[in-house]
Image (cartoon, helix red, strand yellow):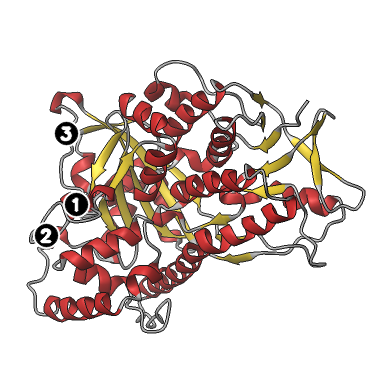
Amino acid sequence: MTAPAVIVGGSFAGLTTALALAERGRPVRILERSAPPPDGPAGKAAALWHRPTVPQGDHSHVLTSLGVRVLRERAPRLLDTALEEGARLLDLTAAAPATARRGQDGDDELVALAARRPFLELLLHRAVRALPGVTISHGTSVRGLLLDAGRTRVTGVVTDGGERVPAAFVVDATGRRARSRDWLADAGVTVPEGLSSPTRLRAFTRYYRLNPADGGAPPGPLNRGNAAGGIWDHYAAVVHPADNGVFAITIGAPTADPATDALREPAAFTAAARLSPYVGAWTDERVSTPLTPVRAITLPPNLLRGGVPADGRPVLGLFPVGDAVCVTDPIYGRGMSLALAHAFRTADLLDDGAATQADRSEAAARLTGTLLRPWFDQAVHDSLARDRLWQARAEGSAPAPSAPAAPGRPAMGEVAAAAATDATVWRGLTRVLMTLNTPAEILDDGAFRDRVRAATATAATATPAPAALRPPSREELLRAVTAGGEA
């Protein structure tokens, strides 16, 4: 009997890898610690799916244009089901400058999927569960790896119940903790540290539902294309539309700012949201009804892994996917889309019948470098720049200028300002923000840089934005938060 592909972790990246492999006829066994999702309509079942092992699942997520492209090409039935069950595609060109002509080359790719992560994950679980050759073992943890005598190849796993599960290869889909690193260390294999850089960010999220009396219509424009709000010079506040009339409001603040602790309280959270441009109207009682309390989370650091052990010998047969390989600052919303792309492309190399295990390990390392490394590097730069700016505002000092992410590259703030009037710059920026093109592919183009400089010079003489579209000062925000927290 052919040994199955064993996938440890039945969350987003693990389920995607299972889908890709099982559809090619490979037997797959998924080992997942949590309980299975409930039955029933996806919109309601997603809200009832309690997953303490995935705390970030209760917060807002984004499926960028890259994620939609991957679903269209690799899992069209899943995308169709999501749309049938209440998700919707958002046309990002609605946020283009007024002078932009619609229907340019590539505009059909400028879409995003409005869906909660648990909703999309539940549909993915159901799709995988229905495939022949797939076994999902819920309530099952893995405590270690099975290795060959030379400790150079993984041959299976051992569960917490003592079951020894042989595997053609093992996929680590255990999220940012990447449990296989601990299992290798327990087996005496030295594991490289990888790269890490802090985000120093925490998020406060609350879910709402648009009132059906208004036909579920949004109360204002999605100025960011797939969201409303902004990332400003001392905090962030963003509305993320989701499925079935549900949306999330997330407020981001520095981890080292106790003045914003009160955002955990609904009244303080609402007061801050109502002061935020493009966000406040969504909290009107005539427009929406809160569905959840305010949930707080400290966001993880940027992480990149995928090196070989210190002795230079790769451990064959072990393939991390998704967050087990790369985590990028969640405020930029790239995680789910990168996980989708990484999982499908990892499945491609695992299904290459002509490749040796060594070939597959080398291909996996190259994939990390080409697909994930550019986004990790950009996230590290942007996280540090944002943290310096926010901390300076909290201290009342002038922020130090940030060096560009690459020599000669315009700052993202400059590009965003130019995108407000130049449609070509807008499209380029949107393709980067939506993960369709790497920053280098767009921002390092000479003609693009010239357009940014020209549009930035024009913007310097433009009329300032109306007061209603300017975020509150830090002092105004803290007064509202404090008053709300004491209410």
Q: Find out whether the residues at labels 3 and 1 contact each other: C-beta distance under 8 Å.
A: no
Q: CA distance from mark 2 to mark 3?
A: 25 Å
Instruction: Tell me the number on the disc at residue 100.
Output: 2
Q: CA distance from mark 2 to mark 1?
A: 9 Å
Disc nearer the start of the sequence (3/1): 1
Q: Nearer the viewer, residue 447 or 12?
A: 447
**Residue 162 placement (x, y as % from top left):** 85, 30
Q: Which residue is mark 3?
A: 217
Q: CA distance from mark 3 to mark 1?
A: 19 Å
Instruction: Tell me the number on the disc at residue 93.
Output: 1
For marks 2 and 3, give the one nearer the viewer. Answer: 2
| Quadrant including the C terminus | top left
Q: Find out whether the residues at labels 2 and 1 contact each other: C-beta distance under 8 Å.
A: yes
Residue visible at 24% across and 48% down? 108
Which residue in the rendered view is the most extreme toward the front? 354
| Quadrant including the N terminus | top right
**Label 2 packing within 10 angstroms: few (<14), some (14-19), many (20+):** some
Which residue in the rendered view is the most extreme toward the top? 40
**Residue 371 placement (x, y as % from top left):** 50, 59
Which secondary structure lies at badge 3? loop
Which secondary structure lies at badge 1? helix
Q: Nearer the viewer, residue 351 or 268?
A: 351
Residue visible at 33% across and 47% down? 268
Residue visible at 49% across and 39% down? 57
* Residue 360, placed above or below residue 210: below
Q: Amino acid at mark 1?
A: Thr
Disc nearer the start of the sequence (2/3): 2
Is residue 467 at all visible to an observer of this figure?
yes
Is residue 265 at all visible to an observer of this figure?
no
